[in-house]
Image (cartoon, rainbow, N blue to C red):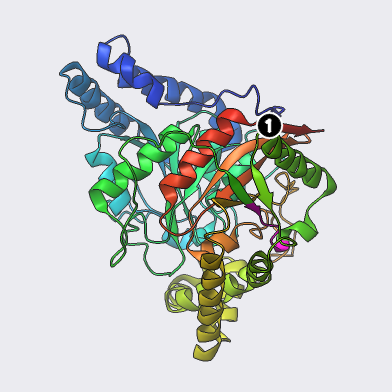
């Protein structure tokens, strides 16, 4: 069932606005959970967002939350919040199979640091969402909630689709190249890709560019999830963690924004270019000054450095993963996709000098990004290269044929820069969501959240048929 997406009228599922009714007893977290389960029963056969659900455990947690509200003692701003977890993160009560047949039945019985923090805050961990294999590009069965013939993006496919189809108000995704922001943009969600190290990844710290971040139906829920996790489990080892208030930052209007084209502009379709330029015009009409690469040499220098972001990311991450991937292939190679094996082969053809060169290129890009910090409040660009691609299915006999979860070309820059960004559902192209993202300097997560909140509230969305 296709559903034409209109950001002006689409009603996302939200949680923060229900908390007052939990406090006064006119509604309960258990009732809210049951509404989520009803939607899952209706939408899941087509959307296929979940690997596993723990309905009994969720009901038990929701009942405990209901009692805490009755006693006037909720544990946090997200007590009773139904949330789903990307199936890369360990959960003590559900298997963690990472979208890979080699991990079928894997049941660690531990909680990832972020999952542990969510439970400590009283959140209701409802299920594990589909991930592309090992967090890579070989996708699972999840479809886009607005058109089942299209991808929801990846690798956080199920998390994006579960929120977009109103199954849950929030879900946790992960990103190395673009796996939080791109699927959120394809599915019409808001999402935060935090400053590198801002949210404790627990056992998922094998790569230097991966992050955890929330998908949500609104900025308020997005921020509350992120900050409640950071309050309890902190950031990565040796990292400063996520900074910001314990309630969602108030909306703030940016005065000046830098428009980044990135390497993605050249591959963007005409309709998406029209939509984004229309959004920029709306920002200018609201009194926001826009700066472009032709205006300042420092912006041009940044544009030139981030052109190589996909290649730099594509060298760093496979190298860092190579030993784990080799162990897996040696043990259970028959259960690993040809796409994952091709990534391993690339890594094993690299040398330490190749990796060092990529790290130095990343550091140079980070310096170029820091140099524009005083020019504007933030940067804005697209979150995805147009609407979600159609997925006609696998091509028989061609295991490495393109399987479109979408290109991360607009996402690898923020990942490489370790910069926070928030994607905003502000455009519809051909009836499908297309997001725009606002990106700041490292540790400006709260500031970007405040800007995103203002832009979503005050700037008219753009529709191009």
- The quarter of the picture where the N terminus appears is top right
Residue at left 53%, top 34%? 454
Q: Residue furthest right?
A: 270
Residue 163 image point, x, y percent:
51, 35
Vertical side of 226 occupied by 298: above or below = below
Magenta stretch containing residue 298, yes or no? no
The answer to which of 321 and 138 lies nearer the viewer is: 321
The answer to which of 287 and 264 lies nearer the viewer is: 287
Residue 293 image point, x, y percent:
71, 62
Vertical side of 310 occupied by 349: above or below = below
Is residue 232 something that shows in the picture? yes
Label 1 Cα neighbours within 10 Å, binned few <14 / some 14-19 / many ≥20: many
Helix, strand or loop under label 1? loop
The answer to which of 87 and 265 lies nearer the viewer is: 265
- The quarter of the picture where the C terminus appears is top right
> What segment carries the magenta color?
258-263
Residue at left 48%, top 54%? 420
State the residue position of label 1.
Answer: 461
Residue 312 image point, x, y percent:
59, 74
């Amino acid at each position: 069932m296709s559903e034409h997406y209109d950001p002006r009228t689409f009603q996302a599922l939200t949680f923060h606005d229900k908390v007052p009714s939990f406090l006064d007893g006119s509604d309960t977290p258990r009732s809210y959970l049951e509404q989520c389960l009803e939607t899952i029963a209706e939408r899941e056969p087509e959307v296929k967002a979940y690997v596993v659900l723990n309905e009994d455990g969720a009901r038990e947690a929701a009942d405990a939350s209901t009692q805490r509200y009755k006693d006037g003692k909720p544990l946090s701003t997200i007590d009773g919040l139904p949330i789903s977890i990307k199936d890369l993160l360990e959960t003590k009560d559900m298997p963690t199979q990472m979208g890979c047949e080699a991990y079928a039945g894997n049941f660690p019985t531990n909680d990832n640091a972020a999952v542990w923090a969510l439970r400590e805050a009283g959140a209701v961990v409802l299920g594990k969402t589909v991930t592309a294999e090992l967090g890579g590009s070989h996708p699972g069965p999840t479809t886009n909630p607005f058109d089942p013939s299209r991808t929801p993006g990846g690798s956080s496919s199920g998390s994006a689709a579960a929120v977009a189809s109103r199954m849950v108000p929030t879900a946790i995704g992960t990103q190395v190249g673009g796996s939080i922001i791109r699927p959120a943009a394809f599915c019409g969600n808001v999402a935060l890709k935090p400053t590198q190290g801002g949210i404790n990844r627990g056992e998922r710290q094998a790569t230097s560019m991966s992050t955890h971040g929330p998908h949500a139906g609104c900025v308020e829920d997005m921020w509350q999830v992120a900050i409640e996790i950071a309050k309890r489990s902190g950031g990565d080892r040796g990292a400063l963690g996520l900074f910001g208030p314990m309630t969602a930052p108030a909306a703030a209007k940016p005065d000046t924004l830098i428009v980044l084209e990135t390497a993605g502009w050249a591959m963007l379709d005409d309709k998406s270019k029209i939509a984004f330029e229309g959004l920029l015009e709306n920002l200018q009409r609201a009194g926001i000054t826009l700066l472009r690469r032709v205006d300042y040499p420092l912006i041009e220098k940044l544009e030139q450095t981030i052109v190589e972001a996909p290649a730099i990311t594509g060298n760093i991450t496979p190298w860092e993963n190579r030993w784990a991937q080799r162990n897996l292939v040696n043990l259970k190679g028959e259960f690993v996709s040809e796409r994952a094996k091709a990534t391993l082969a690339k890594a094993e053809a690299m040398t330490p000098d190749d990796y060092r060169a990529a790290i130095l290129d990343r550091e140079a890009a980070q310096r170029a990004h820091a140099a524009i910090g005083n020019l504007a409040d933030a940067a804005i660009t697209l979150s995805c290269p147009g609407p979600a691609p159609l997925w006609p299915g696998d091509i028989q006999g061609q295991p490495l044929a393109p399987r479109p979860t979408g290109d991360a070309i607009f996402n690898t820059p923020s990942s490489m820069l370790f910069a926070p960004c928030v994607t905003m559902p502000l455009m519809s192209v051909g009836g499908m969501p297309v997001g725009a993202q606002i990106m700041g300097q490292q540790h400006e997560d709260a500031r970007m959240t405040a800007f995103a909140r203002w832009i979503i509230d005050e700037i008219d969305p753009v529709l191009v048929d």
